[in-house]
Every structure is written in C-alpha cells, then in structure tokens.
Image: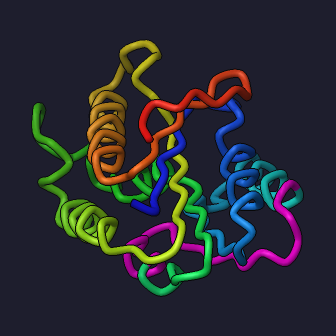
C-alpha cells in the first residue's frame, strides 16, 4: 500500500517527519492542508508551517472536501502530504454540540459522507500519500461532551486510516517509531 499514517501529539515533530519522508521519496510533492485561519493565533501557526515547508511544493487548501482534493492530487509519480486529518475532522464536527447526549458524529450528514468518502478512496489512491494526524488519546478525558466526541472520533478515524495504510509511524519528541510496515 502506498499510504502512510504519521501520528503524534502536539509539537511532536509529525509534520516535520512527513515533510522529510516526502523529500526522501524523490517525487514532486503536493500538500493538502486542512487548517483554517479563523483567528490570529491560527494564522501564526499556519505561517510557521508555510515557512518550514520547502519551496516549490504545490499546496492545496481543503478544510472540507478532503476526498475530492485527494482524488485530484494523488497520482503515480507524485507524493501527497495531507496535513492534517485531525483539523479536517474538527472542521467536520460543526454542529456536533447540538447532538443528543451519547450520539456519535455519524449523525452529522456532512461528517458521515466526508468520512466514508475518504475511507473509501484510500485503498485506490495512486502514488505515495502521507497522512498526518494527532494522537489525542494519550491525554486527559476532555471536560465537555463535544471534547469527548472529538477525542473519540479522532481515535476512530486514526484506527480506520491505520488499517488502510501499509505503514504507520508514531512520532514522539521528534523520534519516529514504526508501528506498522
């Protein structure tokens, strides 16, 4: 399988590792970014990622519609970096705070369609694809129902993508640990 999932905590070095893997591939690199600059702090974070990224890489913004963007960008002889699945998931959970207690995000039509489209596409992707995601399950239990739903859905998404990828790497303190492949 040409896909790899790279997971880790905040500031663990997972994006840097994905960038290094993309460089090592020797292929032209396309990056699909999922963050939205909705406030000044996020604008600064995005600018830092942009400055760290090698020049000459094609960048596509896809805060939603990830499967569509990925289908358009993935190709034989190309490396695609998706950074990151966790922010994409957060973008899809709009309205989740109105769900009845105990309901999963699959009750949100946009979430259910987007997630199914992504997971259905992964096995058929051509070229090399590197997915970056946060591992949020090592932390404390979130205080709010929405926080707990986000943590649960992030864990489920990571498990589903990991099952479809030929390689899975956990990055902690900048050090990659191969979990699969």
- Residue 108 x %, y %: 19, 58
Q: Residue at x 50, y 79 (%)?
A: 74
Task: Report which quarter residue 58 is drawn in.
Answer: bottom right
Q: Nearer the viewer, residue 134 or 170?
A: 170
Q: Is residue 135 above or below residue 131?
A: above
In the shown orientation, is residue 74 left or right of residue 48? Answer: left
Q: Residue at x 70, y 26 (%)?
A: 175
Q: Is residue 38 above or below residue 178?
A: below
In the shown orientation, is residue 57 left or right of residue 25? Answer: right
Q: Residue at x 52, y 64 (%)?
A: 129
Magenta residues, as a range? 52-70
Task: Report which quarter residue 121 is drawn in.
Answer: bottom left
Q: Is residue 104 above or below residue 46?
A: above
- Residue 76 x %, y %: 53, 82
Judge whether residue 54 is colored magenta. Answer: yes
- Farthest residue to the bottom: give it: 72
Labels in figure, total: 0
Q: Nearer the viewer, residue 51 or 169?
A: 169
Looking at the rendering, in which quadrant would you find the C terminus?
Answer: top left
């Amino acid at each position: 399988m040409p896909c790899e999932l790279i997971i880790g905590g905040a500031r663990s070095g997972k994006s840097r590792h994905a960038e290094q893997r993309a460089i090592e591939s020797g292929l032209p690199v396309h990056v699909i970014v999922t963050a939205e600059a909705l406030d000044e702090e996020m604008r600064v974070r995005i600018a830092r990622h942009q400055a760290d990224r090698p020049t000459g890489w094609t960048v596509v913004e896809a805060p939603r519609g990830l499967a569509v963007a990925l289908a358009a960008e993935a190709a034989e002889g190309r490396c695609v970096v998706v950074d990151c699945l966790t922010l994409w998931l957060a973008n899809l959970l709009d309205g989740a705070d109105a769900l009845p207690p105990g309901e999963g995000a699959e009750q949100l039509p946009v979430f259910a369609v987007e997630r199914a489209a992504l997971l259905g596409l992964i096995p058929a992707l051509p070229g090399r694809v590197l997915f970056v995601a946060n591992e949020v399950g090592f932390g404390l239990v979130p205080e709010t129902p929405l926080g707990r739903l986000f943590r649960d859905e992030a864990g489920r998404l990571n498990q589903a993508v990991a099952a479809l990828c030929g390689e899975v790497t956990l990055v902690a303190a900048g050090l990659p640990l191969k979990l699969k492949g």
